[in-house]
Image (cartoon, rainbow, N blue to C red):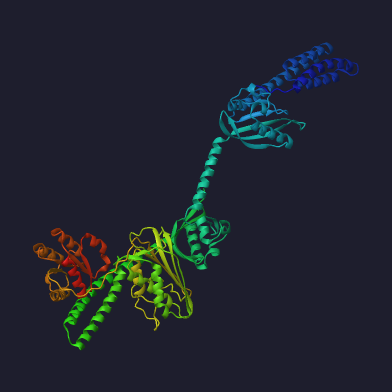
Amino acid sequence: MNIKFIDKETIYAISSILGSLALVVISKVFGLLVNNTILFISIILLKSFFISRANSKLISFICSSIFTIYLLIEFDIQYSIIIILLYAFTYYTRTADELNSKYLDEMQYTIWDLTEDVLFIKDLNLRYIQINKAMERFFKLNRNDIIGKTDSEIFDKKIAKVYNETDLEVFNTRTKVSIFEETEVSGVVNQMMTIKQPLIDHENNIYGVFGISRNITEIYEIKKQLEENNELLENILHYVPNPIFIKDLNSFYVRANKAFCDIHELSEKEIIGKSDYDLFPKVIADKFNTFDKEVSDTGKVMINRTTTKIKGKVIHAIDTKAPVYDKNGEVTHIIGIVQDLSLYKNLESKILENQKMSSIKNLASTIAHDLNNILSSSLGYASLMRSIEENEEKISYIDNILNASKQASDLINRLMIFTKQYPDKLVSLNLNDIVTNIYNLIKPSINNKITVITDLQEIPNIDGDLSKINQVIMNLLVNAVEAIYSDGRIYINSSVIEIHDFSRFKYIPNDLKPGKFVVISIRDTGIGIPESTINRIFEPFFTTKNEENRKGTGLGLSIVYGIVLNHYGLISLESVEGEGTLFEVFFPVGSLTTSNNHDRYSLIYGKGNILCIDDEQIIHDLLMTTLTKLGYTKLTAYSGEDGVEIYSVNFKEIDCVILDFSMPGINGIETFKKLKEINPDVKVILSTGYGAKVDIDKLLKEGIANFLPKPYTVKDLSYKLDLLISS
């Protein structure tokens, strides 16, 4: 397949024939002027010029024949032989050249058609004058559908416009032009890369444009996938919650993700180029640089636990650093991931605090139980002595014993409030009323330099024990007053909020449900609480009132803590030393509508058989004397097992059981269940000083007839017995 142009070869062929004829005429003219040798040489040169320009064997043969015949006629035979030999040599040389040229042409056009890239040539009118087979295959067109046509006659307007504009750019700039475009063929979109080159002749004139197009769809898709993967990796780096950074071997930051930037309150642009010495104290920066050098030198992953302060915030973290290698296996960078342990530290602190408070509660409950047993005996015997003594002086001594015992009992009750999980008596209460009453009660004792500002919003009632809630408000108000040494302010506010997330609270009751809570906040502008002691503020017997005129028992806030949690409430504390303290208590909105009050009662005598189940001898001795004094008969059991056995034999004669809650072996609850199996109508008074584990409402629903907390008086006991036996 040859490329045909207009052709210079045709012109040369015509010129060769005309030139040969002209030489005959010229030779005649020159023959008159010069000798034969000069004429012979001239003819040979002119013949060689014209014949060498002719591309046709026929033209060459015609021209050579004209010259040969003429020379045989005009010259001697020796010249003719020489000319024939020279012609034969010339013909042989030309034939060999033609064969080589033909072989080269065929090889070039074989390559032209074998290539998978689209090849084409256009003329100055932007018409296709040559294409290869790859172009036919790609566009699914025949050669005749393309040759002689322009792009606008073959393709749609949009792509034709792009092709034409780039062709004109090639012509105008006389330089190579590269373009990337989408080409749709039979509904399939292909990504094409095309390079166009101007065709320039030996006179430096452009006579066309040559183009080569390659289908790079597969490469484009791979590149697109790589870009998407890179974008995904960038997003992972950017949005992962752990701070991540990359440093060079000089420990300068070259990348940082959003979490790392947020910690330092800088943008990535501001961090890049900085070192640890720009972000951390020198001591910490030295340590980090040492880690970096060890990673780069050893090629090992390094894990270190660090504590540093950034923007005033202490951060406990685990830093993991690893080397980044190039394709030659050389370390080029260091990547680091920071695991912030602050949240875990806070959770750990909360767990330890709860464990500590739980241990203290258990200890306090045990102490309260034992002391109540002792005080029950003291109060019981003292009250019996008081009832039979007639000597005024002795009565006064007994009263002193009773008063002292009652004070001790009050102290233990306050301790039991801290340990107890359930309130005694729930009624519907309005916290605004309680705050107002308590404030009016202590108002006369408040320093006139202290200003109290109240903002009590309209709030719903809560369900609570009136005396306990009074104690909460009283303690918090008194603490606020005592925190202000001279002049200052106390702010008391009430409101209603919804709480769904309890994570900000340090102490959370079990089974607390989200919902609406009534909030009482009491803020003072006093001395505040030192940071070193704020975590111990709710511990029993811990007090910050060390001045001589401000001594405290250390039970006030621990009791507040216990009461609030017993009411399924929450408590929060904020304090800055030298600026003041804010306490907030949160109680769930209540559901009760009436308030219950119980009347005081007098000593009541009676008759009946009472089974006393208790592991303490001192309690049995007291009950023997007391019950006998009240007119009852006592049966004695020192364990739950003994009590069940005695009851199983005598349950028809037993009118009531006084049952201790905490005993070795089977406890009071298990004993009660066994008694109920014997007699479903058994009447049981549960008595204990171990308040932390007793759910009174639940036990009453299960069939416990009444509850008698230790220490109790003879009047309390007589009333409970009369209530059960008479009914």
Whether residue 332 is situated above or below residue 394 in the rendered picture: above
Foreground pick, 406 / 428: 428
| Quarter in which the N terminus is drawn | top right
Res 74 → quadrant: top right
Residue 370 picture location, percent across and down: 23, 73
Res 307 → quadrant: bottom left
Horizontal relation, residue 697 to residue 108: left or right: left
Q: How many labels does the image show?
A: 0
Residue 520 picture location, percent across and down: 42, 67
**Does the rendering let one see residue 245?**
no
The residue positioned farthest toward the right in the image shown: 33
Residue 462 picture location, percent across and down: 36, 64
Horizontal relation, residue 458 to residue 209: left or right: left
Res 302 → quadrant: bottom left
**Does the rendering let one see residue 484?**
yes
Foreground pick, 593 / 690: 593
The residue positioned farthest toward the left in the image shown: 649
Residue 620 picture location, percent across and down: 15, 73
Foreground pick, 517 / 416: 517
The residue positioned farthest toward the bottom in the image shown: 393
Residue at figure coordinates x 18%, y 81% from the top left: 387
| Quarter in which the C terminus is drawn | bottom left
Whether residue 276 is situated above or below residue 558 in the rendered picture: above
Horizontal relation, residue 35 to residue 265: left or right: right
